[in-house]
Image (cartoon, rainbow, N blue to C red):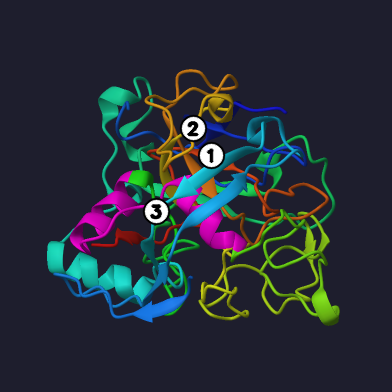
């Protein structure tokens, strides 16, 4: 696995995690850092706020967590999770807009950059923005993600592809850093899922680890059931699944627990710090992740786990939408394929 590429965009230095076929697609590119540092039963899940995301009750239980296919998902190990409630789909732009209206919250991608963090960079170049997938016009080597990622000034949750674009209400909110997701969850009277909860829910009651969260076939019945990349990555997406990038929530069938888009579409933040060696010492009961973050490819970065893959997942470059796989992201970074959903404790 290669990681920690040094980007140069309008004179700014920022790093991007390359995650190849043995890792994952690029869930997050580190934009200029602002801070150094029986299931499926519907419930109305009353909230103290205007959050309207429908939740389902996941009864919890035991399962074998992880995968034999990736270095950081081994060993496969027994885990028990308690019951919890989970949003049926990713938080949408409309739902995030209600949060912003109520709180006047500004996401990290919208905040001014501190010139003190970027000595020598002209002030007029320190423009808020975020990473946007920009497919090249022709095939390119897959060793350099700069060929398909661009730091776009003015890109944020309201303008996913830059100032001239506009967020669609029923699409997942994107360009969300960990701090942004946490702020929304707290406002909604919820929290972010642990990765154990996320994986248990995504499996939808699977008693054994099938290749995909939806089953053993990539296209059951000849149909695409998740929003990933088809065609030649990254320059040509045939859109066989109906979408070139983000799809509206509930565009594909729900799993056995009534949860949508647990594969593909956008990566989803989990509350756990990321360490590739954590599974070797993970407790069985309700694991909440390690006490600190460590990625040997980027030792100085604080990272949290991300799950589920995105619309950029392709077997040519990324297979981290498969059962048991993990993603990771630096906590102050966002991109147009990164969002979240929430959970809530059962009381």
Q: In the rendered structure, which disc, 1 or 2, sits on the residue that comes first in sequence?
A: 2
Taking the spot 43% from the left edge, 55% from the top edge, the residue there is 175
Label 1: element kind: strand
Label 2: element kind: loop
Pair 1/3: label in front: 3
Mark 1–mark 2 CB contact (< 8 Å) = yes
Using the image as rendered, state which of residue 322 and residue 238 is in the foreground.
322
**Position above or below: 168 against 21:** below
What type of secondary structure mainly makes up the magenta span? helix
Q: In the rendered structure, which disc, 2 or 3, sits on the residue that comes first in sequence?
A: 3
Q: In the rendered structure, which disc, 1 or 3, sits on the residue that comes first in sequence?
A: 3
Taking the spot 74% from the left edge, 54% from the top edge, the residue there is 136
Instruction: Locate residue 300: give its quadrant.
Output: top left
Q: Is residue 336 left or right of residue 218?
A: left
Q: Which residue is mark 2?
A: 274
- State whether residue 19 appears in this view: yes
Q: Is residue 246 left or right of residue 174?
A: right
Q: Which mark is residue 328?
A: 1
Q: Residues within 10 Å of mark 1 (few under 14, many from 20)?
A: many
Taking the spot 46% from the left edge, 63% from the top edge, the residue there is 160
**C-alpha separation, residue under disc 1 versus residue under disc 2:** 6 Å
**C-alpha separation, residue under disc 1 versus residue under disc 3:** 24 Å
Q: Position of residue 43 (x, y in %)?
A: 33, 79
- State whether residue 337 appears in this view: no
Image quarter hosting the C terminus: bottom left
Q: Position of residue 340 (x, y in %)?
A: 43, 58
Pair 2/3: label in front: 3
Magenta stretch bounds: 179-203
Instruction: Verify whether residue 199 appears in magenta.
Output: yes
Q: Which residue is mark 3?
A: 82
Taking the spot 67% from the left edge, 44% from the top edge, the residue there is 24
């Amino acid at each position: 696995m290669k990681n920690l590429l040094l980007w140069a965009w309008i004179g700014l230095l920022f790093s991007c995690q390359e995650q190849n076929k043995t890792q994952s697609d690029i869930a997050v590119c580190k934009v200029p850092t602002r801070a150094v540092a029986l299931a499926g039963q519907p419930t109305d899940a009353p909230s103290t706020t205007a959050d309207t995301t429908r939740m389902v009750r996941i009864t919890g239980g035991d399962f074998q967590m992880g995968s034999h296919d990736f270095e950081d998902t081994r060993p496969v190990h027994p885990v028990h999770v308690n019951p919890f409630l989970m949003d049926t789909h990713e938080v949408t732009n409309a739902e995030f807009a209600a949060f912003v209206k109520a709180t006047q919250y500004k996401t990290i991608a919208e905040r001014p950059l501190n010139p003190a963090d970027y000595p020598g960079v002209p002030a007029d170049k320190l423009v808020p923005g975020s990473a946007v997938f920009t497919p090249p016009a022709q095939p390119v080597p897959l060793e350099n993600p700069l060929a398909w990622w661009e730091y776009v000034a003015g890109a944020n949750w309201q303008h996913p592809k830059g100032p001239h674009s506009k967020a669609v209400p029923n699409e997942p909110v994107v360009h969300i850093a960990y701090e942004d997701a946490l702020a929304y969850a707290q406002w909604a009277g919820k929290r972010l899922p642990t990765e154990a909860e996320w994986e248990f829910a995504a499996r939808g009651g699977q008693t054994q680890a099938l290749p995909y969260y939806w089953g053993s076939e990539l296209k059951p019945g000849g149909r695409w059931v998740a929003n990933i990349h088809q065609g030649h990555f990254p320059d040509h997406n045939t859109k066989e699944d109906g979408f070139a990038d983000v799809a509206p929530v509930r565009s594909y069938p729900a799993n056995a627990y009534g949860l949508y888009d647990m594969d593909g579409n956008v990566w989803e933040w989990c509350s756990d710090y990321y360490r590739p060696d954590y599974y070797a010492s993970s407790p069985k009961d309700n694991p909440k992740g390690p006490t600190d973050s460590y990625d040997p490819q980027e030792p100085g970065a604080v990272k949290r786990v991300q799950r589920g893959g995105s619309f950029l997942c392709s077997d040519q470059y990324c297979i981290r939408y498969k059962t048991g796989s993990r993603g990771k992201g630096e906590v102050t970074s966002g991109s147009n394929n990164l969002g979240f959903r929430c959970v809530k404790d059962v009381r």
